[in-house]
Image: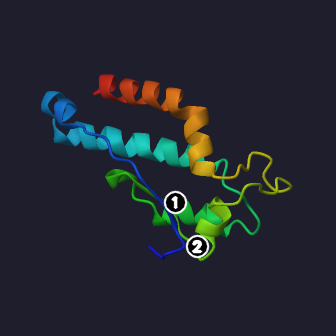
Amino acid sequence: MSNDAVGLDVDVDLSEIEALLGDEATERAQTVWAQKVLDDMNKHCPEDTGALKASAPIASRPETGDLVWNTPYAKRVHELDSVGTSISSDALPHWTAAAKDLYMEDWAKYAGELLVED
């Protein structure tokens, strides 16, 4: 990852859940959950050429909880206090934190649903 990439490590202690469900089921749920978090965050990623938004699915590793926007300007754009919305009306400054504020309750519910499915 370049020094200008925006990375988000999703660290959650799953040891008690792993003990109940097993490693494979827990890893599968984590991967699906992290992909949902990435998708929700990426909805609010600012767009100009689309490269920043497109970098996330390529650079991220949902199976390990690593969500990354990897362009030479990712960090600079992430730290802007305002962003243009002419291309993406959902774009928000500090899009990872903004999405967390918007979706955390939904993410927690979704995680619970995933774990119950297994």
The label number, if any, that marks residue 71 in the structure image: 2
Residue 23 x %, y % = 17, 41
Horizontal side, residue 87 vs residue 54: left or right: right
Other-residue count near label 1 (Cα within 10 Å), few / some / many at <14 / 14–19 / ≥20: some
Residue type at mark 1: give it: Pro
**Residue wearing tag 1:** 57
Quarter of the image containing the N terminus? Answer: bottom left
Tag in front: 1 or 2:
2
Residue 91 x %, y % = 73, 50
Residue shown at the point (57%, 49%) measured from the top left: 96
Residue shown at the point (30%, 42%) measured from the top left: 28
Horizontal side, residue 91 vs residue 69: left or right: right
| Front residue of this view, candidates 11 and 56 | 11
Residue shown at the point (54%, 73%) measured from the top left: 4
* Label 2 SS: loop
Residue shown at the point (66%, 69%) measured from the top left: 51
Horizontal side, residue 24 vs residue 90: left or right: left
Question: Height in image: 35 above or below 86?
Answer: above
Residue 77 x %, y % = 67, 64
Mark closer to the chain start, 1 or 2 = 1
